[in-house]
Amino acid sequence: MTTLLRPTEPPPATAPTSTRRLSSGLVFLRQFFRQPAVLGSPFPSNPRVSRALIDQLDLEGASAVAELGPGSGVVTRLIRRRLAPGAAFFAVERNERLARTLQREMPGVPILHDDAGNVGAIMRARGIAALDCVVSSLPWLLFGPELQGRLLREAAGALRPGGGFSMVTYRNPAMASVRAFRGRMEGVFGRVWLERVVWSAFPPASIYYATR
Ligand SMILES: C[S@@+](CC[C@H](N)C(=O)[O-])C[C@H]1O[C@@H](n2cnc3c(N)ncnc32)[C@H](O)[C@@H]1O
């Protein structure tokens, strides 16, 4: 059967760009089923958790900031809005598909497909001497003690004295695994505190800060 199109109508597209290219939120969900222990959660942080992760950091006054585990970019977008023009920023994402998708959504922002354990090497390659802030939403409590310690030392070593670090966990602060992780943070940072619990998250999210 022949379909008649009026001359002004464009030919039917095979599919609009937005449906052919999955958004980072959908990629995040799909990647969770492939790598649950790397992503840690099927859904990105909710807006309150995302804000709580950066509220206590002086991002406006920072010259260099890194984000570990940007995932779908919910926190990345908030960080970028607060950074001064000219401030150095990079985000390190271990999942290649997520890194590529977020890079496409945020052209011009360095979204690096790499490991949080390589922050020092990345800084050297980019000519950054020290970071003012490290924002992390890595699934820290899914990592073993050795990896936790290694990544914490890498993050703390990247910060200038007085620089700030933030992280989130969806586990209860009273749990032994969380207390052990906090102890590891205290081993590498000068000061560590539980800033707040975001009750609107499920399960509630505990936001920790640390300074070097
Ligand atoms: C719980 S998700 C958080 C994503 C996003 N920042 C948010 O708040 O919704 C954790 C992210 O950390 C990434 N990740 C896990 N281990 C990593 C590592 N060693 N280095 C870099 N990224 C890592 C995962 O791929 C995932 O995107």
Image (cartoon, rainbow, N blue to C red):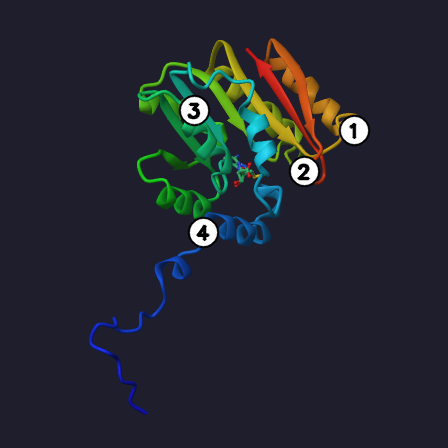
- In the rendered image, residue 91, in percent from the top left (x then y), is placed at 43, 32
Tell me whether circle 1 and circle 4 mark residues in contact (CB < 8 Å).
no
Q: CA distance from mark 3 to mark 2?
A: 23 Å
Identify which residue, 30 or 186, lies in the foreground: 30
Q: Which residue is mark 2?
A: 201
Q: Which mark is residue 29?
A: none
Q: Which residue is mark 4?
A: 23
Vertical relation: 130 (above or below) 100: above
Quadrant occupied by the N terminus: bottom left
- In the rendered image, residue 44, in percent from the top left (x then y), is placed at 57, 42
Q: Earlier in the sequence, mark 1 or mark 4?
A: 4
Q: Earlier in the sequence, mark 4 or mark 3?
A: 4
Q: Amino acid at mark 4?
A: Ser
Asked whether mark 4 lies closer than 8 Å to ligand 1, one says: no
Label 4, secondary structure: give it. Answer: loop
Q: CA distance from mark 1 to mark 4?
A: 35 Å
Dividing the image into four equal quarters, which quarter contains ligand 1?
A: top right
Examine the image and state in which quarter residue 50 appears: top right
Graded by Cα atoms within 10 Å as few (under 14), some (14 to 19) or many (20 or more), the crowding at tag 1 reads few
Q: Which residue is mark 1?
A: 175
Label 3, secondary structure: give it. Answer: helix
Q: Amino acid at mark 3?
A: Arg
Q: Which residue is mark 3?
A: 82
Label 2, secondary structure: give it. Answer: loop
Q: CA distance from mark 4 to mark 3?
A: 23 Å
Vertical relation: 44 (above or below) 185: below
Label 1, secondary structure: give it. Answer: loop
Q: Earlier in the sequence, mark 3 or mark 2?
A: 3
